[in-house]
Every structure is written in C-alpha cells, then in structure tokens.
C-alpha cells in the first residue's frame, strides 16, 4: 500500500550571510534566479534554521531526570525525555525541525532547477549546483535519521521513509509518497555522487557556513558510515582529513588556556578560524541555555551520576577526568546538578532593542573533523584493519587528553573486558543474574543490524572504545542518539534520588522499540498519513504492562 504525506511548508526563513555578524541575514529573494550571483546567494537559505540537537540529546542516554524536586522543566522537554510523541510547540520541536528542513530542501530544488535552466556551464554554477545537491541530501539524511528507523539492509526496503523531494515545488501542501528508508538512502547516495566531482570553495565568501569541499567529504563520511559502506566512509574521510589529521582537529590544549568564561569558550568553539569546524549552522534555539551554565531545563541533564559512571568523569582507558586538557565543568545545587563542556553559545537576536525582545539563537558545528576521524576509525574496525584504526584512536585520545598511553588491541581488550556491561546484575562468581537500569558503566551491550564479532572479542572491544570516544566527542551535540540507534543499545529512563543517584527505572527503550523513530509531526498525521508505528511488536500482555508503565510515567511527569 502506498503511503503519502502532506507537507506543511511556510515561507522561507532568512539565512546567515556573514561570520563576522552571526545574526546578519540573507533576504528571502524569490525573484527570478537568472544570474550566478542571485543563485549563489539564494542557496544560502538551503540550510535549516531549526535544530535537531535538543531533541536527540534528550532522547539519548546522556541525560537523567532529577525528578519532581526540580522545577527547571516544561511539558515539551518532559515529553521528549519520556520518548513520548511530542504535542507541545517549541523552537526545538520535531515539527519545527521537519518544516525547516523541508523549507531548505525546497530552496535547494529551486536553485537546482534554475541552474539546470541556465545550463550549469560555468565553474561557479557547477559549484553552486553541488552545494544545492548536498543541502538536499543532508536535509533528507538528517530527517530520515530522526524520523525513521536506522538503515538496516534487511528491512530498509519496507521501513517507512520520508518524502524525497527532487522536483521543483510551486504549490504548498502537496502530497508525496513517503517511500522507504532504502529509497531515501539511494537518493541521498545519488545526490552525493553527483555533487562531489563539482564541489569547490570558489563561490563562498564565508566557506564554513556552506558545504565547502572538506564539509562535503565530512558529510559523505557520516552518510556512508551510517549506510554500512565502510570503504567509502574511509575514502571520504581520507579526502576530508588529508595526510596530517592532527593539524585538523580541535586544539584542546589551547582551549584549556582560555579564560574560564562561558561566552569566551562557546564563541571559540564555533569559530570559523578553526580547522575542525567543517560546517557551521545557525538555529532559533535554547541550546546555549540548556547546555550552558544556566538553570533552563536542568531537571533533565547530563548529571554527575551519568558523567561519573558512563562518560567524561568515568574511569576510562586513559584514567580519570583530570587527564582532559579542558576538564568538564561540574555544577550542583539543591534541585539541579549537571556536568558540561562549554560548547554552544547563547546568542540573542533583538527584533526591538528598545523593548528588549527578539529571538534566542545559537550556532553549532554540524560537521567536524574530530567526528570524521572517529568515523574513519569505526569503519576501519568494521573491516578489521586494526592498526589503522589504532592510529586514529591514538590521535584523538592524545589530542583531547594529556595521556601518554599508546593504545593497542591488547590493552583496549584488557581494559574493556575488565568492565561489566551497564545494567547487568553480576553475582560473586561473575554470572549475570538479572538487569538493573540503575547500574551504569562505560560499556553497553551492542546489537547492530550488521554483523560484529562476539562480546569480548578484539572487534567488539575496539567498537566499545570508539563508541565511547564518540560519545565524549559529541556530548551536547545530539549525535549520541544516532549511535544508540545504529548499535541497538538498550537504555532506561531513570529517576534520581535526593543524592543525585539513580533510584528507580521508569521505562526502557528496547532493541526493537518503535520509539527509536521520532513520531512525525501531528499536522502531517492529520493530513492523512499513517504515523510511525507504536507498540506493534508487543504481545497483548506486554502492551498492557507498557500501558500501565506509561500511565505511571504520565502521572509522574504532570506533577
């Protein structure tokens, strides 16, 4: 049966024009796109002005719930944290990200159509078309990874996708086939392959806010890693990083010398002068507040417990948190406690300076070389090219920490095999006797759709290492959720006690849980499309148990 979707698209929002003034805007110019200059400028609006980061970070295992004792919350973030279908409106809502992404896709398609009409017969036009194709591919890719199941070769041909829009749209509220995840990935692949031979940096005055050449290769690396095309992921990572990747990474030793000030650190983090920042994007967002030293939404946070047992403050292969050049910042209070790095800035765009009103904004690195390096390491591990993977893992570890340890397959295996898996209850004889979501370590059971070697093997231990590194690298950037999906990681929803430690488990996200695909927006469902399924794989008794648990959660969160 064909599945259709209604796209509720509003007028194109204004885009970024300058890195010197982050809040400068491009006009929404729908005039005839009949010159190179007009087209190039127009493509600046093919980037979404809402972000996925808030939702995906809150969905992941990077956050715990401080409980009703904390008043720093609202209904939107409570719904997201509880893996509920979001009904509340917010700048970070799935609805706004969906709309902003399809707005960007429409812009890209308009630019592509105009370029094709002009013949795409100049270097600038070819580079402009490459940028537009990459914008179209990137927006579809991120939408698919938020609103669909992760790509699984065995099921992608039937798993629900999202509409892949390639035609020039001249009317609003058109209906499109939703298609399958396989079809979405095939179209992304096609757009990337058409774009890469044409991509260049000649048309950009501020390349870091566009799909410049290195950003294009960085995106291709992520896409082919998620697609399970390991050789291609390595190929494009090589082109992105060049022959000396150390010079391309974030310089954490320099970050450590900066004044301990949130604005100083966060503005440096998104600087256009840094090699590590491949592609920067802007968003109407609370990210700078929620992941900064403020109280906003701190009921749900990366708290001391998860930090000490699973992430940046946990005992790791390099030692403890003092090994970091730039150590995590720890905050505590009577009804809030959180551990953060200063990353994304809080910016305010005044629409009326006199009345002091306007929009909360931020800038975030959508693609970085540090992520690309770890993606290459992961792809190399999948191909069992361990010596090459170790080179990348050592480069990353020595860049972010002061450790002198040289990673080897042997010491990685020894370390990770000495750590119990999160949530396992183990008796004195080392036998797993049960499951308890309050028990955490830096290691979790992996259940990817693709084949990996058994637990405790060289490959599995190497994967534990790279996933742990990725989790720290992408903390507060929303990417951990996609690793949870890619590797079928089971995670709990936990209520903390007064001491800030996990006390009870309210819910579990299981391996085949339908909630791994965020529900598509309500207005799209209202337009007649079948929503993402919920509870379809459970038995009747399991459904009743889940309903009872959801009732408990609902009563808990409305207090």
Image (cartoon, grey):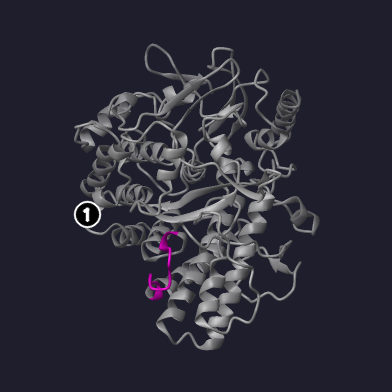
At horizontal 29% and vertical 29% (from top left) the residue drawn is: 317
At horizontal 63% and vertical 43% (from top left) the residue drawn is: 514
Q: Residue 222: x percent and y percent?
A: 42, 55
44 magenta-colored: no
Can residue 380 be seen by looking at this rendering? yes
At horizontal 23% and vertical 31% (from top left) the residue drawn is: 403
Front in this rendered view, residue 117 or 270: 270
User: Which residue is under mark 1?
Assistant: 244
Q: Residues within 10 Å of mark 1 (few under 14, many from 20)?
A: few
Secondary structure beneath label 1: loop
Q: Residue 391: x percent and y percent?
A: 22, 46
Relative placement, left or right, of 160 versus 429 is right
Q: Which residues are magenta?
A: 198-208
207 magenta-colored: yes
Q: Residue 8: x percent and y percent?
A: 74, 61
Relative placement, left or right, of 304 versus 276 is right
Q: Residue 419: x percent and y percent?
A: 35, 24
Location of the C terminus by quadrant is top right
Front in this rendered view, residue 453 or 63: 63
438 lies above or below 324: above
């Amino acid at each position: 049966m064909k599945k259709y979707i209604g796209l509720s698209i509003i007028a194109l929002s204004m885009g970024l024009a300058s890195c010197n003034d982050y809040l400068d805007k491009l006009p929404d110019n729908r005039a005839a796109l009949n010159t190179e200059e007009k087209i190039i400028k127009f493509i600046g609006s093919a980037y979404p002005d809402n972000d996925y980061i808030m939702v995906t970070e809150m969905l992941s295992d990077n956050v715990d719930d401080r409980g009703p004792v904390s008043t720093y919350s609202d209904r939107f973030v409570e719904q997201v944290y509880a893996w509920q279908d979001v009904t509340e409106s917010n700048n970070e809502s799935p609805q706004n990200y969906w709309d902003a992404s399809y707005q960007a896709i429409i812009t890209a398609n308009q630019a592509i159509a105009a370029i094709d009409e002009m013949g795409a017969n100049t270097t600038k036009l070819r580079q402009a078309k490459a940028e537009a194709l990459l914008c179209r591919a990137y927006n579809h890719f991120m939408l698919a990874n938020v609103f669909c199941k992760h790509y699984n070769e065995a099921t992608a041909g039937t798993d629900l996708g999202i509409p892949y829009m390639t035609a020039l749209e001249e009317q609003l509220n058109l209906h499109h086939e939703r298609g399958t995840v396989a079809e979405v990935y095939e179209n992304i692949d096609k757009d990337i392959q058409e774009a890469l031979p044409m991509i260049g940096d000649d048309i950009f005055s501020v390349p870091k806010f566009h799909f410049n050449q290195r950003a294009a290769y960085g995106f291709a690396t992520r896409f082919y890693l998620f697609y399970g095309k390991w050789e291609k992921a390595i190929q494009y990572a090589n082109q992105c990083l060049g022959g000396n990747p150390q010079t391309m990474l974030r310089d954490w030793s320099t970050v450590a010398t900066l004044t301990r000030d949130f604005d100083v650190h966060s503005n440096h983090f998104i600087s256009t002068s840094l090699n590590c920042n491949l592609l920067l994007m802007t968003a109407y967002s609370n990210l700078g507040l929620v992941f900064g030293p403020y109280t906003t939404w701190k009921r749900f946070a990366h708290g001391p417990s998860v930090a000490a047992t699973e992430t940046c403050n946990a005992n790791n292969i390099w030692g403890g948190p003092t090994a970091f050049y730039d150590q995590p910042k720890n905050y505590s209070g009577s009804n809030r406690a959180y551990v953060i790095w200063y990353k994304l800035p809080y910016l305010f765009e005044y629409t009326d300076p006199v009345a002091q009103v306007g929009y909360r904004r931020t800038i975030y690195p959508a693609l970085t070389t540090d992520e690309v390096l770890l993606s290459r390491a992961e792809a190399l591990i999948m191909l069992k090219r361990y010596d090459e993977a170790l080179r990348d893992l050592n480069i990353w570890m020595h860049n972010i920490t002061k450790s002198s340890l040289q990673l080897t397959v042997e010491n990685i295996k020894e370390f990770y095999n000495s750590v119990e898996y999160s949530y396992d209850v183990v008796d004195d004889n080392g036998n797993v006797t049960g499951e308890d979501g309050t028990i955490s370590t830096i290691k979790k059971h992996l259940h990817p759709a693709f084949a990996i070697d058994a637990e405790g093997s060289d490959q599995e231990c190497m994967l534990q290492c790279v996933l742990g590194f990725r989790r720290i690298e992408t903390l507060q950037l929303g990417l951990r959720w996609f690793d949870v999906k890619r590797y079928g990681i089971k995670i709990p929803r936990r209520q903390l006690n007064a001491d800030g430690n996990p006390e009870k488990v309210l819910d579990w996200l299981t391996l085949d849980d339908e909630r791994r695909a965020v529900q598509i927006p309500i207005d799209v469902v209202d337009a007649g499309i079948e929503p993402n399924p919920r509870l379809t794989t459970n038995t009747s008794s399991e459904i009743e148990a889940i309903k009872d648990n959801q009732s408990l959660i609902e009563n808990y969160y409305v207090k």
